[in-house]
Image (spheres, helix red, strand yellow):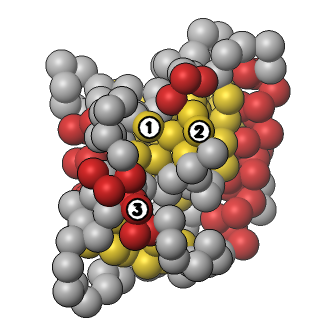
Amino acid sequence: MALPQTKRYTFADLLTWDEGERVELIDGDPVMHVSPLPAHQAIVSALNYQLYAHLRGTPCRVYPGPIDIRLFQEKDQGPEDVDTVVVPDLCILCDPGRLDQKGYRGAPAFVVEVLSPSTRRHDKLVKHSLYEKAGVKEYWIVDPEKKMVLVHLLEDGRYPSPEGYTAKDTVKVSVLEDCTIDLAEVFDY
C-alpha cells in the first residue's frame, strides 16, 4: 500500500523512520508492507537453510529480509540521492565491498520474493521491473498458495518467460555453481 505522496522521499528520510516499519521506496514513493504470514516465513527459512549450507566457504552470503537494497545507488551517491530501496524476502550478495551497516548498494546476484496477498501485484510487476532494470541475474517468485516457483533469468538485460517449478521439483540456482534447491523441503509447511 502506497502512502499519500507529499514529497519525494529518499533513503536519508527512510533512515530516520521507525526501524520496526517495513518500508520500501519506489522512485521516492514509500510503500509499507505488513508482517508476513507463517507459510511465507517457513518458505524463507527453508530457502535460507539450503542456500546457507551451500555458500559456506564462499564470498557470497544469503540474507533473509529485511535488508535494505539500494538497487541504483552509485558509489559516490549519499543517502539523500537514493530514491529506490527494496527489501527482498531473501537475496544472495556476492560483493562484500557493497555491503555496509545500512544494507547493500547495487543489484544482488539472486533475489527471492514470496508472494503474499498484500504484495502479489507489487512483487510480480513493480519489483520484477526494478530487478530487471537493475540487472539482478536471477529472480525467483515463490507462490505459497500454488506451491510453485517462477524462475526469471536475465538475458540481454531482460527477463524472458520464466521457468515454472512445483513442490516435486529440484531447481538449479543458476548464479551459483553446483547449487540446487529441493522444493519439497521449501513447501513442507
Q: Would you call the spot at circle 2 few (<14 residues within 10 Å), some (14-19), or many (20 or more)?
A: few
Q: Which residue is mark 3?
A: 12
| Position of 160 relative to 155 (above/below) | below
Residues at marks 3 and 2 touching, judged by CB atoms closer than 8 Å: no
Looking at the rendered structure, the secondary structure element under dot 3 is: helix
Give the residue drawn at x 39%, y 34%. Answer: 106
Query: What numbered label is drawn on residue 146?
Result: none
Give the residue drawn at x 72%, y 42%. Answer: 48
Give the residue drawn at x 67%, y 35%. Answer: 62
Q: Nearer the viewer, residue 102 or 137?
A: 102
| Position of 53 relative to 2 (above/below) | above
Residues at marks 1 and 2 touching, judged by CB atoms closer than 8 Å: yes
Q: Which residue is mark 1?
A: 105
Q: Which residue is mark 2?
A: 100
Amino acid type indicated by mark 2: Asp
Q: Position of residue 167 (x, y in %)?
A: 63, 46
